[in-house]
């Protein structure tokens, strides 16, 4: 008899960060994970995560809205349906619910986790099979201070934990950001790959100047220098700058990826399960990129371990030219799973056990879960 979806629970889980994390549009001191658990009629359950950055400062779904959408729209649509046919469920969800890709990602992840457990297979196998079981992971230097970033980078290089760093710039004057980046390239650049993420902060003119100088100082990758609305400027930069350009906010789904490729973008796409609607859905974007000769990068919304491992299962099935940034769990002071991921030698290890390969620690979940709702 086919297993059906019986129960869908969700929690808003607030976990402090190890230090303030400064991006061009917000500074994070805490991350809110939306954790979802789907229980099937055969007793098997699966977990998923929907996590965004800084409330509504990064994406159009807030954690509170994600939870509300799951309770009021996704749950009634899924309850009583066969839990075993992911394609049929995704079609059902996408026919009834526009957008809401963060919530979709958590649901898709939980269904995959449960199905993997039911079949005795890791999620990567459900997605076609892993090409890699260890993936490179960079670290983001974003303390807000050049000296502290250099000290942090040196400590992590000495410990062998990372071999690539991404700098968050764009909040300050262009010249200040360029001085900051140059100092870090000079201090760490011969031991590590240095990349920057501008998070849309520059207009087209500043971006042309900024990108030229970043390329000249030896930065390896320039992420989202201009607004997601200005795809013309992004395409021009990708064609004119010697350093590769990474599209992040400009590309969420395979539809965006197709349009940007058609416009002539060359460079790489930051894949994120939350932007695309889940570990299965994000692969459509990856395949469009591959067909267009655009490179692949495993991106994060600074998820905790559940969202991070869900992403890793998807990334493991792809040749990633630019590695990953799946360091989210390391930015948080604590973990809500009982078997955290293993990070070492600049990489992270993909679990091989059925489903996602991680389990919730119920006590930690209850400790960090928000107790009341407005
Ligand atoms: C982003 O825009 O890429 C990823 C790493 C990080 O520090 O911030 C995120 C979001
Ligand atoms: Mg980015």
Image (tube, rainbow, N blue to C red):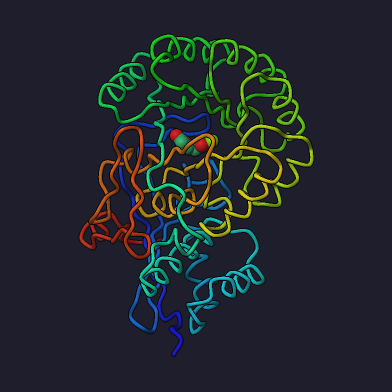
Compared with residue 149, is residue 111 higher up or lower down, i.e. above or below?
Answer: below
Q: Is residue 282 left or right of residue 254?
A: left
Front in this rendered view, residue 251 or 268: 268
Which residue does the image show at 35% across and 29% down from the upper left? 162
Q: Position of residue 97 (x, y in %)?
A: 63, 67
Compared with residue 253, is residue 77 higher up or lower down, i.e. above or below?
Answer: below
Which residue does the image show at 43% across and 33% down from the upper left? 27
Q: Position of residue 298 (x, y in %)?
A: 50, 42
Q: Residue furthest left?
A: 363
Which residue does the image show at 36% across and 37% down from the upper left? 347
Quarter of the image for the N terminus: give it.
bottom left
Q: Position of residue 166 (x, y in %)?
A: 46, 27
Front in this rendered view, residue 249 or 44: 44
Q: How many marks?
A: 0
Which residue does the image show at 29% across and 36% down from the upper left? 344
Residue 175 falls in image quadrant: top right
Quarter of the image for the C terminus: give it.
bottom left
Residue 150 falls in image quadrant: top left
Q: Is residue 113 left or right of residue 57?
A: left
Front in this rendered view, residue 125 or 65: 125
Q: Is residue 230 left or right of residue 355?
A: right
Q: Position of residue 41 (x, y in %)?
A: 39, 84
């Amino acid at each position: 008899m086919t297993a059906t979806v019986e129960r869908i629970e969700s929690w808003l889980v607030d976990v402090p960060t190890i230090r303030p994390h400064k991006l061009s549009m917000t500074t994070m001191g805490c991350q809110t994970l939306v954790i979802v658990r789907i229980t099937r009629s055969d007793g098997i359950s699966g977990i998923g995560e929907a996590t965004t950055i800084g409330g509504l400062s990064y994406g159009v779904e807030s954690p509170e809205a994600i939870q509300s959408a799951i309770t009021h729209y996704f749950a009634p649509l899924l309850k009583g349906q066969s839990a075993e046919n992911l394609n049929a469920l995704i079609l059902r969800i996408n026919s009834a619910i526009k957008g809401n890709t963060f919530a979709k990602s958590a649901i898709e992840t939980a269904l995959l986790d449960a199905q993997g457990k039911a079949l005795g297979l890791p999620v990567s196998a459900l997605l076609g099979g892993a090409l890699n079981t260890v993936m490179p992971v960079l670290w983001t230097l974003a303390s807000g201070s050049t000296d502290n970033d250099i000290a942090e980078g040196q400590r992590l290089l000495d410990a062998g934990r990372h071999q690539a760093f991404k700098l968050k710039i764009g909040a300050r004057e262009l010249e200040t950001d360029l001085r900051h980046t140059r100092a870090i390239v000079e201090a760490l650049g011969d031991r590590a790959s240095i990349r920057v993420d501008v998070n849309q902060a520059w207009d087209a003119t500043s971006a042309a100047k900024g990108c030229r100088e970043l390329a000249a100082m030896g930065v390896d990758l320039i992420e989202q220098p201009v607004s997601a609305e200005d795809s013309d400027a992004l395409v021009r930069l990708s064609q004119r700058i010697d350093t590769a350009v990474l599209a992040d906010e400009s590309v969420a789904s395979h539809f965006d990826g197709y349009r940007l490729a058609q416009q002539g973008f060359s460079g790489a796409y930051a894949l994120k399960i939350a932007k695309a609607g889940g570990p299965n859905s994000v692969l459509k974007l990856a395949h469009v990129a591959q067909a267009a000769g655009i490179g692949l990068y495993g991106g994060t919304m600074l998820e905790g371990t559940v969202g991070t491992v869900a992403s890793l299962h998807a990334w493991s099935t792809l040749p990633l030219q630019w590695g990953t940034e799946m360091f989210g769990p390391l930015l948080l002071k604590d973990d809500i799973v009982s078997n955290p991921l293993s990070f070492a030698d600049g990489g992270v290890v993909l679990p091989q056990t059925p489903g996602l390969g991680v389990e919730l620690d119920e006590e930690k979940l209850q400790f960090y879960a928000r107790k009341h709702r407005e």
